[in-house]
Amino acid sequence: MEKTTLNVNGMSCEHCVKAITQAVTALDGVSDVNVNLGAKTVTITHDLAKSPLDKIKVEIEEQGYEVVV
């Protein structure tokens, strides 16, 4: 399992936390999602073979947030 932290813009409330957490957790191979509003980060524990980083980024962006590289 890999632990990845992404910087994400556009998060401002608990609804944002819930939306991102539910969307990313639903991906195959993701075992944990931790959203930190103050730091504007999302930390994901995932299996790279089942949930590569690009797939996770797309899922977050589809929820209306910007993943900053």
Image: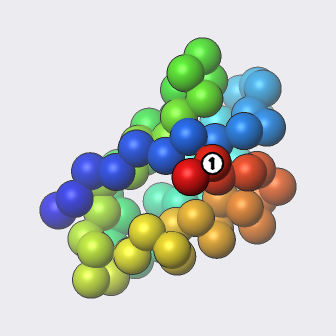
- Colour option used: rainbow
Decide: is 17 above or below 66: above
> Which residue appears at 26% of the width and 50% of the height?
3
Decide: is 1 above or below 44: below
Answer left or right for 43 relative to 39.
left
Instruction: Please state the horizontal and vertical placement of residue 22, each as a whole percent of the image.
Output: 59, 54
In the rendered image, the residue lying farthest to the front is: 69
> Which residue appears at 63% of the width and 42% of the height?
8
Q: Secondary structure at mark 1?
A: strand
In the rendered image, the residue lying farthest to the bottom is: 49
Q: Dot 1: within a 10 Å radius of its alpha carbon, few (fewer than 14), some, or many (20 or more) residues? A: few
Question: Label 1 amino acid?
Answer: Val
Instruction: Please state the horizontal and vertical placement of residue 46, each as a whole percent of the image.
Output: 30, 63
Instruction: Please state the horizontal and vertical placement of residue 67, each as a whole percent of the image.
Output: 64, 52
Answer left or right for 35 relative to 23.
left
> Which residue appears at 56% of the width and 52% of the height?
69
> Which residue appears at 17% of the width and 62% of the height?
1
Q: Which residue is mark 1?
A: 68
Decide: is 44 above or below 60: above
